[in-house]
Image: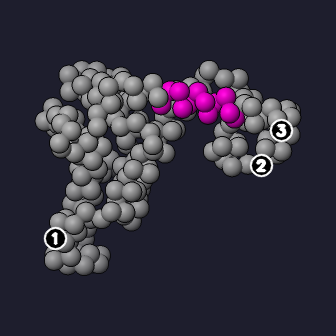
Amino acid sequence: MPPETRHSLIQRLQDGGDNAAWEEFASIYRPVIVRIALRKQMQFDDAEDLAQQVLLLVLKNINKWKSDPARARFRTWLQTVVRNATMNALSRRPKDQASGGTDSLQQLHQRPDKSDSLSFDLEWQRETLRWVAQQVRGEFESTTWTAFWDTAIEQLPAQEVAEKIGRSVGAVYIARSRVMQRIKQRIAELDDDSITQ
């Protein structure tokens, strides 16, 4: 399980004026929001608009969020914001699109779908992995990175990757292992950075 959104990042967002913090936050969460919206059958442009709206809502309301173990985690709060914004966007669709009626929409607003939570968590984990991988990519030679990416992410056979980069199959496994270890280490470093539960 990857770490929660770091408390230090949330504080930097709450302090305002930290463009690097905002870029980091948006680079992780914007793709998550877009993919969640696409899973709800939104068009890509509408999903992008929704992501922009959610990020603006977060920017406006981040100062209201407080770390409290008795309350929801930050990611749970954000998931609720995404879910509500998605449902609002879907409910504003033109009348000729089937929506199930007002009663159905009210039920959707009242009952969180467990698959929404799983979907949000899965997308967040994927995006965290991508983000961390990009953070450590420059630490490796291109052949080492290719060995990792092609076998671990693209799921290509080690033999095929070995031939592609001109190395042995054993070297491919070692390279993949080195990169994966660094990614795990980087995630642990983030986890140690005052995680918000």
Q: What residue appears at the point 80 percent right and 32 percent down from the top-left corner?
A: 171
- As measured in the structure, the alpha-carbon distance from the residue carrying label 1 to the one carrying label 2 is 48 Å
Q: Is residue 119 above or below residue 90?
A: above
Front label number (1 vs 2): 2
Q: What residue appears at the point 18 percent right and 44 percent down from the top-left corner?
A: 71
Q: What residue appears at the point 83 percent right and 38 percent down from the top-left corner?
A: 169
Label ID, residue 77: none
Q: What residue appears at the point 22 percent right and 45 percent down from the top-left corner?
A: 72
Q: Is residue 183 magenta?
A: yes
In percent of width and height, residue 6 lies at: 33, 30
The stretch in magenta equals 176-187
Packing grade of label 1 (10 A; few <14, some 14-19, many >=20) is few
Q: Is residue 36 above or below residue 21?
A: below
Mark 2 sits on what residue?
Answer: 157
- As measured in the structure, the alpha-carbon distance from the residue carrying label 3 to the one carrying label 1 is 56 Å
Q: Nearer the viewer, residue 42 or 77?
A: 77
Q: Identity of the amino acid at label 2?
A: Pro
**Any part of residue 42 in sight:** no
Q: Earlier in the sequence, mark 3 or mark 2?
A: 2
**Any part of residue 66 in sight:** yes
Side of 41 relative to 169 (left or right): left
Q: Earlier in the sequence, mark 1 or mark 2?
A: 1
Helix, strand, or loop for circle 3? helix
Q: Going by the picture, which residue comes out furthest to the left?
A: 64
Helix, strand, or loop for circle 2? loop
